[in-house]
């Protein structure tokens, strides 16, 4: 959807309904005041304005030019806030204009309050050419495609009202194209993307349902999102990622000094937005992008670890694959401010991510250039600055394990032949389809056998590799893939080692658990990049379920001690003095000792996947109790008689009566 990001129009509902409270009280700490303060909440209008302005802030931070955003306020008429002119494309201009617009009017008897006025003005704004489009028209050598996006923040009663709003928008769009055909000052709108966000107070339930992107007409796409007012900022933050082809990165483990105690420091996390190219250049390599869902949101972020910062000198420059501007997501937070100031002072920071073959590698660099901060994707493979390989080493130097046979099969699957041109066939239509298919099937494609486990054990996963290349999967295909996944999980449960070829594979001598972990991760990456059909999603869910239920194997006593030592070292070197205690410190030491002592006899029970942890502990405790020395009284008592528990209990009283002191024990 990033093709619509040149022209964006926000339509903000300014009707009396948007003047009501969002019913989400603001946390205010009035320590010195003894007077009870009533709850304070923002209005729907304030929530909509703040979220849309933050959307603009992120877009204009990352794209200083070329991304134009306009605002239209709609009540009894449409009020134009700014134009396509660069002088009005700034947060200062927009905020000043919004302050002049003011809060929505109170409820009146007028019935002509409607968001439709703003939608009409938005369509007219899309038909107006920008300065860039005027330059292309003046050259008369380029075909000008006029694409645009309209983001409408309003409130509706139900789905029928939303459907009516879409129908009106489609009708006005067709009418505007008819007008543009007869006026040179307007452009025809070739395609439009309509995003409708239904806003309602936090204590209410909406009758409007979310709906994904669908085609309303050949030139109009539309989607509907229904959100509580206090969550509108998170929704627009999520939507801006696909709108401008952005990605999220969370930098973890940033050491920062505390304000109260400058001698101590704590580790913080800072989330940043940037172009998605900073991550996409690593697809198909041996690096593993550690994706995770951000708390409180529904989009993924890539977690990279902070490395030792260094100054940005020419001797430390490294070849990079991509370079993208960076902006913090929470620009007002103290950790974000500290990180930005640190980088603007001339320091640069390396970021690291895990490798498929184990270990970590510095993959990104944060650095400032000319007062702007960039993230650089570093080249992790053979650099073009190195000396070229000799002829005896081959085309790839010492690399000899290229997937030549697999590449030949891939060429056969993507063969193209010339077709006779037809009047009803678009030029290069099949070529574009083949390019799309090739891009999808090569999104994850390791070049060498030494950088992959998945393609070295094809005998276990062959059906999945072949079937997931199809655009859609039938129920039979999904069942066959799931059967293969269950068989792979069964192999892991039986603790069978993967038979890797003897060709210098990096994981040939690695532990069985590490091999299976990397195999599951690579299989999940392969399927997720193969397609997004319901069948692909079902296969991907099956992989994730089996991966999450992988059998646990308790370590040997020596391994457990080593692991505990490593954990203590990690906690001692990375934890903040103000951090809360770890939950691991609350574990009973007797349980740890019991697990370590019973590990050798419990491996088979755990590996089978049929015993719970309680069963294992009970079995180990019974086995331990059988090794104890029996009760001495029972050993001295003849068979058939009951052993007396305290045979000397009465001797103490008898000694006192006879005047003799009891023995001191």
Image: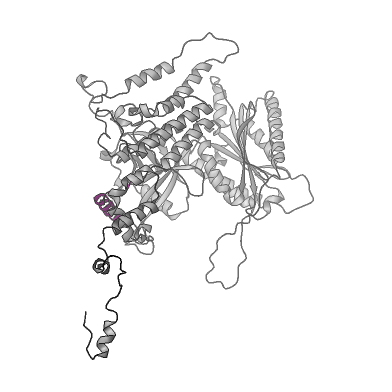
Q: Residue 176 at x, y = what percent?
A: 69, 29
- Give the image quarter of residue 624: bottom left
Is residue 589 placed above or below 208 in the rendered structure?
below
In-image side of 211 versus 284 (left or right): right
- Farthest residue to the top: give it: 420
Visible residue check, residue 320: yes
Figure quadrant of the C terminus: bottom left
* Nearest to the observer: residue 631 or residue 255: 631
Q: Residue 290 at x, y = what percent?
A: 39, 41
Q: Residue 522 at x, y = what percent?
A: 38, 34
Visible residue check, residue 99: no
* Nearest to the observer: residue 520 or residue 205: 520
In-image side of 556 versus 177 (left or right): left
The total of numbered circles placed on residues is 0
Report if residue 655 lies within the magenta region.
no
Is residue 444 placed above or below 604 in the rendered structure?
above
- The prevailing secondary structure element of the residues shown in magenta is helix
Figure quadrant of the N terminus: top right
In-image side of 160 versus 351 (left or right): right
- Give the image quarter of residue 511: top left
- Farthest residue to the bottom: give it: 659
* Nearest to the observer: residue 273 or residue 524: 524
- Farthest residue to the front: give it: 640
Boundaries of the magenta span: 551-571
Q: Residue 411 at x, y = what percent?
A: 40, 17
Q: Residue at x 32, y 28 (%)?
A: 456
Is residue 163 placed above or below 342 in the rendered structure?
above
Report if residue 563 lies within the magenta region.
yes
């Amino acid at each position: 959807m990033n093709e619509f990001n040149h022209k964006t129009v926000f339509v903000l509902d300014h009707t009396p309904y948007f003047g009501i409270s969002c019913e989400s009280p603001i946390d205010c700490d009035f320590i010195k005041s003894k007077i009870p303060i009533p709850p304070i909440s923002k209005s729907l209008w304030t929530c909509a304005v703040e979220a849309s302005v933050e959307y603009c802030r992120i877009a204009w931070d990352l794209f200083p030019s070329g991304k134009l955003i306009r605002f239209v306020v709609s009540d009894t008429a449409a009020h134009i806030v700014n134009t396509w002119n660069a002088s009005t494309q700034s947060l200062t201009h927009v905020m000043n204009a919004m302050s002049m617009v003011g809060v929505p009017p109170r409820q009146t008897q007028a019935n002509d309050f409607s968001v439709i006025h703003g939608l009409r003005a938005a369509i007219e704004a899309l038909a107006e050419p920008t300065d860039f489009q005027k330059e292309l028209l003046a050259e008369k050598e380029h075909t000008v495609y006029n694409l645009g996006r309209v983001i409408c923040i309003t409130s509706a009663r139900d789905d029928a009202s939303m459907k009516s709003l879409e129908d009106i928008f489609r009708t006005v769009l067709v009418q505007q194209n008819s007008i543009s055909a007869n006026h040179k000052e307007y452009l025809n709108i070739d395609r439009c993307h309509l995003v409708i966000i239904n806003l309602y107070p936090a204590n209410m339930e909406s009758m409007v349902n979310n709906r994904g992107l669908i085609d309303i007409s050949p030139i109009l796409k539309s989607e509907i999102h229904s959100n509580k007012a206090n969550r509108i900022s998170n929704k627009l933050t999520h939507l801006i990622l696909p709108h401008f082809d952005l990605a999220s990165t969370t930098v973890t483990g940033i050491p920062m000094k505390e304000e109260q105690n400058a001698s101590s420091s704590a580790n913080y996390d800072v989330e940043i937005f940037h172009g998605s190219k900073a991550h996409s250049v690593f697809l198909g390599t041996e690096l593993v992008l550690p994706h995770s869902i951000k708390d409180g949101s529904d989009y993924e972020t890539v977690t990279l670890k902070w490395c030792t910062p260094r100054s940005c000198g020419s001797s430390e420059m490294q070849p990079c694959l991509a370079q993208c501007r960076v902006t913090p997501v929470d620009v007002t937070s103290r950790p974000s401010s500290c990180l930005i100031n640190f980088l603007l002072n001339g320091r640069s920071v390396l970021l690291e991510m895990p490798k498929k073959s184990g270990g970590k590698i510095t993959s990104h660099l944060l650095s400032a250039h000319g007062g702007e901060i960039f993230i650089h994707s570093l080249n992790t493979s053979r650099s073009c600055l190195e000396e070229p390989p000799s002829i005896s080493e081959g085309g790839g130097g010492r690399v000899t394990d290229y997937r030549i046979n697999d590449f030949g099969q891939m060429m056969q699957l993507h063969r193209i032949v010339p077709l006779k041109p037809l009047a009803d066939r678009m030029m290069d239509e099949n070529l574009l389809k083949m390019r799309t298919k090739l891009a999808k099937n090569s999104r994850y494609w390791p070049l060498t056998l030494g950088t992959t486990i998945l393609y070295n054990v094809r005998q276990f996963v062959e059906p999945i590799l072949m079937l997931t290349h199809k655009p859609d999967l039938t129920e039979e295909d999904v069942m066959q893939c799931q059967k293969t996944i269950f068989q792979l999980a069964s192999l892991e449960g039986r603790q069978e080692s993967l038979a890797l070829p003897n060709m210098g594979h990096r994981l040939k001598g690695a532990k069985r658990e590490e091999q299976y972990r990397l195999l599951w991760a690579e299989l999940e990456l392969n399927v997720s990049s193969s397609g997004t059909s319901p069948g692909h999603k079902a296969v991907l869910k099956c992989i994730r379920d089996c991966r999450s239920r992988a059998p646990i194997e308790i370590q040997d006593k020596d391994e457990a001690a080593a692991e505990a030592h490593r954990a203590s070292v990690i906690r001692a070197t990375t934890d903040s003095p103000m951090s809360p205690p770890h939950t691991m410190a609350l574990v009973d030491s007797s349980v740890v000792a019991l697990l370590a002592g019973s590990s050798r006899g419990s491996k088979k029970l755990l590996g089978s996947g049929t015993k719970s942890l309680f069963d294992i502990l009970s079995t180990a405790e019974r086995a331990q109790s059988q090794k104890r020395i029996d009760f001495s009284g029972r050993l001295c008592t003849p068979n058939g008689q009951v052993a007396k528990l305290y045979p000397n209990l009465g001797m103490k009283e008898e000694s006192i009566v006879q005047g003799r002191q009891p023995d001191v024990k």
